[in-house]
Amino acid sequence: MKIMKSSHRRVVVTSPFFDEEAHAYLKQHGCEVDIVQWQKGDGSLATPQLASLLEGASGWIVGQAYVTRELLAILPDLLVLARRGVGYDRVDVNAVRELGRVLTIGAGGNDASVADHTIGLMLAVARRLRESQNRMLAGNWSILTSSDLSGKTVGIIGLGRIGKSLVQRLKGFEARILVCHPRPDREYGEANGITYVDMQTLLRQSDIVSVHAPLSPETRFLIDSAALALMKPTAILVNTARGGLVDDRDLLDALKSGRIAGAGLDVYVSESDPAFKPVSDELVALPNVIATPHSAGSSVEALARTNMIAAKTVISVFDGEKLPEACVIADGRKPPAAG
């Protein structure tokens, strides 16, 4: 059943790297589009400033801003919020639903890119690429021994779309794959040669632990000092999911003390908590850490896919069309009463 269409079509885009093709798609569908150039550091932009930017807008393609109930309440025209990525921990989902708005994500658009990036971090840490190049730059061309990914035991925490994309890539490395997931899909496991285990078993047995769980109050600091203490001293931790799943203070201690061998990081607690910025700086400076600035899903290809998904979900809401189920996080619209 269709929901009433929206004739007012002003869309504000605060996501960086919004490409011309997605921009053109919105315009072709009758939208007035305002692209605001801002970077991740503007994520906590004050509510009055955001309200001024969004006044009169019916669609918002959201970057890293915090979407609060207070903000939504003073923007009565705003019908749809589209996250280009898949994370929505900065959005008050209950407020979106209760105030009759729609929140979507770019499900499926960057799975392959994040999985590729995760493999890249695994290889870079295991093969000690940073350490080797730094030594060469200093004039030391002696060889550092390193470790293969091939044939290793890799533990995946969380088996959503990205986790499953990672499984496909790891099969090419003939890895033994352990998975900890709250709802094991036994049929998928048998078809793909993975073994479901509990968290403690995964941490104890894995040569590489890769985190792909959503961030929630229950999963915050899922990897803490107790979890790190269970890992092998030769193990590597990779986090391309969300800052806050790993307690970066405990990780820093584990790396500095040799409790684990290395880490590949694309996300950090400091992205949402500035008090952790010194911890992030120390982590990035360690020779056995390969760090990237939350860029795993920002390949040219992934950005093009997710920009278009965001644009299409906005238009679908405006037109009262059915949205892809995987893209809908909250839908507070009331369908018309039956005749």
Image: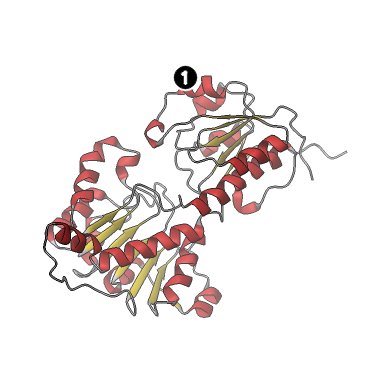
Q: Residue furthest right?
A: 339
The answer to whether any part of residue 235 appears in the image is yes
Q: Position of residue 143 (x, y in %)?
A: 15, 71
Task: Write the residue at 64% across / 29% down.
Answer: 58
Q: Position of residue 332 (x, y in %)?
A: 64, 37
Q: Nearer the viewer, residue 111 or 272?
A: 111
The residue carrying mark 1 is: 48
Q: Which image quarter holds the C terminus?
A: top right
Task: Write the residue at 14% across / 67% down.
Answer: 141
In terms of secondary structure, where does tag 1 sit? helix
Q: Label 1 sits on what residue type?
A: Pro
Q: On the image, which quarter does residue 317 sit in?
A: top right
User: Does residue 289 lie above or below 77 as drawn?
Assistant: below
Task: Write the residue at 40% across / 37% down.
Answer: 40
* Number of numbered discs on residues: 1
Q: Position of residue 51 (x, y in %)?
A: 52, 22
Mark 1 closeness class: few <14, some 14–19, many ≥20 residues within 10 Å: few
